[in-house]
Image (spheres, rainbow, N blue to C red):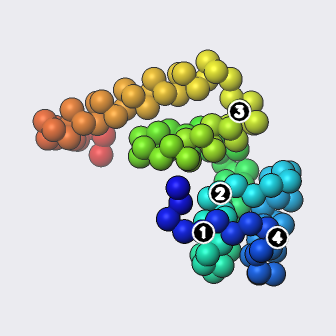
């Protein structure tokens, strides 16, 4: 259960509705997910976060599918169940297959394991890597 009330579209202020409308139009959906409904308790933060998402996740040097897959990897590593589900769904919508997800999780698991081992052993960085 959320720690704050989720702000539904029907009860949202005009400022919040304008962000909700932009989210739905940009994503090509007819609903607002619970993350945005929770953030709507602070309309300025809702607007700022949506602006950041639109800017960072837009096509650029990295294609949108790769960005979603990176988001899945970070979310899984950080233990954010909501973001892992949300961005896995977004990545699937952009073409990620089950095989790609499994390979991504294998890389995430390997990186987390080797990172912990390296940090635990305090391995000095090779000069060739600098």
In the image, what residue occupies the spot 82% across and 58% down?
24
Which callout, 1 or 2, points to the residue nearer the camera? Answer: 1
* Residues at discs 1 and 2 in contact (Cβ within 8 Å): no
Q: Which type of secondary structure does the marked residue at label 4 adopt? A: helix
Residue 88 against residue 17 in the figure, above or below? above
Tag 3 residue: 92
Q: Residues within 10 Å of mark 3 (few under 14, many from 20)?
A: some
- Distance between the alpha carbons at the discs numbered 3 and 2: 19 Å
- Residue 55's disc is none
What whole-number distance in Å separates the C-alpha atoms at marks 4 and 1? 14 Å
Q: Which residue bears the numbered disc 1?
A: 5
Provide residue 62's location: percent of width, then percent of height. 65, 45
Whether tag 3 and tag 2 are in contact, CB under 8 A, the answer is no
Relative vertical location of residue 112 with respect to residue 64 in this rendering, above or below = above
- Please indicate whether residue 81 sits to the left or right of residue 18 in the image: left
Dot label at residue 10: 4
Find residue 128 and report its image quarter.
top left
Toward which corner of the image does residue 122 lie, by quadrant?
top left
Whether tag 4 and tag 1 are in contact, CB under 8 A, the answer is no
- Residue position for label 2: 34
Disc nearer the start of the sequence (1/2): 1
Crowd around label 2: few <14 · some 14–19 · many ≥20 (10 Å): some
At mark 1, the secondary structure is loop
Tell whether label 1 touches label 3 (CB within 8 Å): no
Above or below 101: residue 121: below
Measured from the top left, where is residue 111 in percent x and y? 37, 32
Q: Position of residue 129 (x, y in %)?
A: 30, 40
CA separation in Å, label 3 and label 1: 29 Å
Judged from the image, the secondary structure of the residue bearing numbered disc 3 is: helix
- The residue depicted at 62 percent of the width and 59 percent of the height is 35
The answer to the question of whether label 4 and label 3 lie on touching residues, with beta carbons closer than 8 A, is: no
Sequence order check: which comes first, mark 3 or mark 2?
2
């Amino acid at each position: 259960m959320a720690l704050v009330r989720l702000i539904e579209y029907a009860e949202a202020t005009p400022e919040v509705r304008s962000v909700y409308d932009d989210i739905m139009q940009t994503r090509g959906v007819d609903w607002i997910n619970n993350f945005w409904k929770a953030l709507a308790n602070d309309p300025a933060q809702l607007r700022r976060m949506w602006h950041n998402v639109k800017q960072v996740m837009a096509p650029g040097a990295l294609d949108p599918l790769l960005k979603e897959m990176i988001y899945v990897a970070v979310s899984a590593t950080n233990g954010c169940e909501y973001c892992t589900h949300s961005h896995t769904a977004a990545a699937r919508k952009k073409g990620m297959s089950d095989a790609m997800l499994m390979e991504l999780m294998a890389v995430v698991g390997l990186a987390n394991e080797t990172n912990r081992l390296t940090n635990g052993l305090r391995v000095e960085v090779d000069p060739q890597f600098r």
